[in-house]
Image: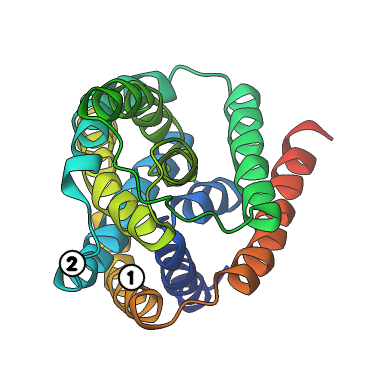
Amino acid sequence: MPLILLLVIIFTASFILTMIGLGGGLVFSPLFVLLGFPVTTAVSASLFLNGIAAASAAITYFRKKMVDVKVGLPLLVTSTLCAPLGAMVTGRINLRVFTGILAMVIIVAAIRMLFSKKNESDGKEVSLSRRIIVGGGIGVFVGFMAGLLGIGGGVFIVPLLIYVLKVPTKTAAATTIFVVIFSSFSGFITHISLAATDWKFILTAAVFSFIGGQLGSRVMAEKLKGRTVRRIFGVVLLLFALKLIQRTFL
């Protein structure tokens, strides 16, 4: 694939996914694997670009006061601590197993985007103990999967915040972006300590990821038509998952 086309895809993924609480890793990781990157290289590059897109979007969300830090903090702490554990497993896992797990995660994400219904907060504040236990618990799983697969974990965090902790949709997306910054970079740091990194590529790509995150977050903060975006991107994710399965198992 020509570099310029790859950079355009990175920009587009960052733009669209930061609008719905994801950083881009759901596209970056499978894309890099399909392009023939070694798994550890694909995952580390995905985590770095995911973190850049999320950090870019978080700037806008903090300015708009859309991030609920007290809800996101338990998730942030446990996911950041557990991402390195997943990163350590990446290089030891069988490629077919890795691809199968990644495809299943992408399919789950696609189904959520295609069929999720709008669900706003009922106005009741969730107790501190529930935020810590539920948020911290899911953070362990999210962090491990983020480090293992090269995704930020937003696909798991957003529905948790909306349906379990009763966080309004836009706040859930913005808070998730804040959390995945730390899980992404935590996993990335571990990966680069274990394998070589193509700094020239990821630093160039980071510029496009950053710009995409800025634009995507601005669109979401001002005017988000979430249903259409989710459905279109849900189809794209399903195509990625099917391509991964076809290339690896068929």
Res 213 label? 1
Q: Residue drawn 33% across and 58% down?
A: 171
Is residue 78 shown left or right of residue 26?
A: left
Q: Nearer the viewer, residue 58 or 210?
A: 58
CA separation in Å, label 2 and label 1: 17 Å
Q: Residues within 10 Å of mark 1 (few under 14, many from 20)?
A: many
- x 26%, y 45%: residue: 179
Instruction: Give the quarter of the figure containing the C terminus.
Output: top right
- The residue lying at 27 percent from left, 33 percent from top is 75
- Which residue lies under the disc numbered 2? 65
Residue type highlighted by circle 1: Gly
Which residue is at the front of the view, 46 or 223? 223
* Secondary structure state at the residue bearing disc 2: loop
- Secondary structure, mark 1, is helix
Q: Residues within 10 Å of mark 2 (few under 14, many from 20)?
A: few
Q: Is residue 164 above or below residue 181?
A: above
Residue 117 position, x and y percent, is 63, 56
In depth, the one of 204 and 165 nearer the eye is 165
Q: Evaluate if marks 2 and 1 touch, with contact meaning CB atoms under 8 Å apart.
A: no
Q: Is residue 92 something that shows in the picture?
A: yes
Q: Nearer the viewer, residue 138 or 190?
A: 138
Q: Quadrant of the N terminus?
A: bottom right
Name which quarter of the figure residue 33 lies in: top right
Image coordinates of residue 84 in percent, x first then y, are: 26, 25
Q: Is residue 145 above or below residue 185?
A: above
Q: Is residue 189 left or right of residue 34?
A: left
Could you tell me the amino acid type at mark 2? Answer: Lys
Q: Earlier in the sequence, mark 2 or mark 1?
A: 2
Snapshot quadrant of residue 188: top left
Is residue 36 visible in the rendered image? The answer is: no
